[in-house]
Image: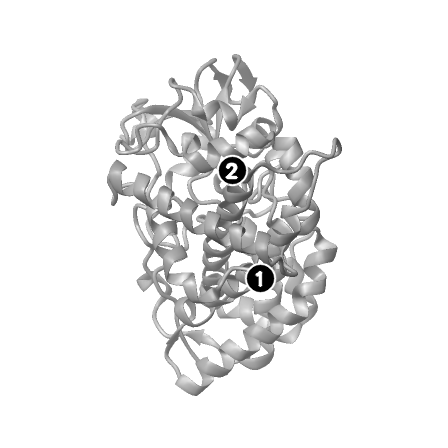
């Protein structure tokens, strides 16, 4: 009898059989226990939502907030994180700016129109990286040669950050996103080092501003004419740099793996490149790791959902990836259809806390896919798809490598 059946809380995150498949428990949870008790690596209790309707409702419900995760009774993800990720100095600084105010000040730089203007440069950089891949010769790892360096280049260019410092970003990302590897002292030190780095960078831009987002934000103001605080600027730079490279790098690697794991998917795109946009959306829906740990919320009141009641004071995990496979929301959800439309997946969330950088991620994925299809139409995995491995213990569970050849 499984833990789902006998009522014991599941250990969370739930482990999938292979990196490209969803956990077997998802379907059973949606059917018989859509508001399920789970236990985090810290030992703290939470509830997991897996139905599309419940996750969509929860993400948009003002009674379920991200800010509440800083409360003392909110569940902590890891035992070494005594204050919780959502009480980190970076999170506190962003909360102090006011969420709606912060999104208005920063969000205008991440519109679909602005990202479309950057797309030719993204494709140019992707072409250069593919040149190196071809010169190297297969097999070659997509993660180290393309999926990681491209988003680093793009976000560093946008923010005005030296790309030469990317190994620092990689180390800090690993520390913040790893659930088991680092102690509280190591995590605190990483937060301090990253904040000091960003403070120095911003100070330099005050003296010599450039044509980049951080320089622009130095002179930005809200509707009342109030600028962003110094702590807010530092935290904004940190948040955008982390999210702008780590998550997108994982998406690019997973997209490549999913499309090549079934040759028919890749061949359909080679023959019909007009499907690139819909293929990207389908990868975002289909990938069981795309939204990583899921979005956490804190319930300020008892909340009734289709799958049951979420009691006041509960920490809630909204599994967008599980919701994206809901049989009641999708036709043949277990099938990847690169031409699927419409595709209202929840990978980037929904409502006021949806991912600010989703236009950037979508544009980068479309740019990379367009270049790969044009330059390497014979691309294929150099290993069996079941041999691919994740970085275990990470909030985002990215692939370690994606070996390809042509």
- Which residue is rendered at x = 49% and y = 63% of the image? 162
Give the percent coordinates (x, y) of residue 373. 58, 75
Tell me which residue sits at (61%, 55%) in the image. 360
Q: Which residue is mark 2?
A: 231
User: Badge 1 is on which residue?
Assistant: 365
Of residues 231 and 83, the one drawn nearer to the viewer in this rendering? 231
Residue 336 position in % (x across, y down): 54, 56
Position of the N terminus by quadrant:
top left
Residue at position x 42%, y 51% from top? 197
Q: Would residue 58 appear left or right of 140 to someone viewing this image?
A: right
Q: Earlier in the sequence, mark 1 or mark 2?
A: 2
Viewer can see residue 368: yes
Across and down, in percent, residue 35 comes to 45, 24
**Front residue of this view, candidates 311 and 3:** 311
Q: Is residue 74 above or below residue 27?
A: above
In this rendering, the answer to whether 129 lies above or below 40 is below
The C terminus, quarter of image: bottom left
């Amino acid at each position: 009898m499984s833990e789902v059946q006998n009522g014991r809380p599941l250990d969370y995150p739930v482990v999938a059989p292979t990196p490209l498949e969803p956990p077997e428990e998802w379907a059973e949870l949606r059917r018989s226990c859509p508001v399920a008790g789970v236990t985090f690596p810290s030992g703290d209790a939470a509830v997991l939502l897996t139905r599309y309707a419940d996750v969509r409702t929860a993400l948009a419900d003002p009674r379920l907030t991200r800010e509440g995760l800083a409360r003392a009774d909110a569940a902590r993800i890891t035992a070494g994180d005594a204050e919780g990720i959502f009480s980190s100095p970076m999170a506190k600084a962003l909360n102090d700016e006011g969420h709606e105010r912060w999104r208005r000040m920063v969000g205008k730089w991440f519109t679909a129109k602005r990202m479309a203007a950057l797309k030719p440069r993204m494709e140019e950089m992707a072409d250069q990286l593919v040149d190196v891949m071809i010169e190297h010769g297969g097999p070659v790892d997509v993660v180290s040669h393309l999926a990681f360096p491209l988003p680093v280049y793009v976000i560093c260019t946008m923010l005005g950050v030296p790309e030469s410092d990317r190994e620092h970003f990689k180390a800090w990302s690993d520390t913040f996103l790893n659930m088991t590897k680092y102690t509280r002292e190591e995590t605190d030190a990483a937060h301090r080092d990253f904040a000091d780095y960003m403070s120095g960078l911003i100070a330099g831009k005050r003296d010599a501003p450039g044509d980049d987002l951080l320089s622009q934000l130095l002179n930005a103001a809200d509707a009342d004419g109030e600028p962003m605080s110094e702590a807010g600027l530092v935290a904004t730079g940190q948040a955008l740099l982390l999210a702008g490279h780590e998550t997108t790098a994982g998406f690019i690697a997973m997209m490549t793996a999913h499309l090549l794991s079934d040759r028919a998917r890749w061949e359909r795109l080679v023959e019909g490149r007009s499907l690139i946009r819909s293929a990207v959306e389908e990868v975002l829906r289909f990938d069981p790791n795309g939204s990583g740990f899921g979005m956490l919320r804190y319930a300020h009141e008892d909340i009734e959902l289709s799958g049951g009641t979420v009691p006041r004071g509960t920490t809630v995990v909204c599994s967008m990836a599980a919701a994206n496979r809901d049989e009641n929301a999708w036709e043949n959800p277990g099938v990847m259809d690169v031409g699927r439309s419409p595709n209202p997946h929840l990978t980037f969330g929904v409502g006021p806390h949806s991912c600010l950088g989703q236009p950037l991620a979508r544009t980068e994925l479309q740019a990379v896919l367009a270049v790969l299809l044009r330059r390497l139409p014979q691309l294929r995995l150099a290993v069996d798809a079941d041999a691919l491995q994740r970085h275990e213990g990470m909030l985002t569970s990215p692939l370690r490598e994606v070996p390809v050849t042509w």
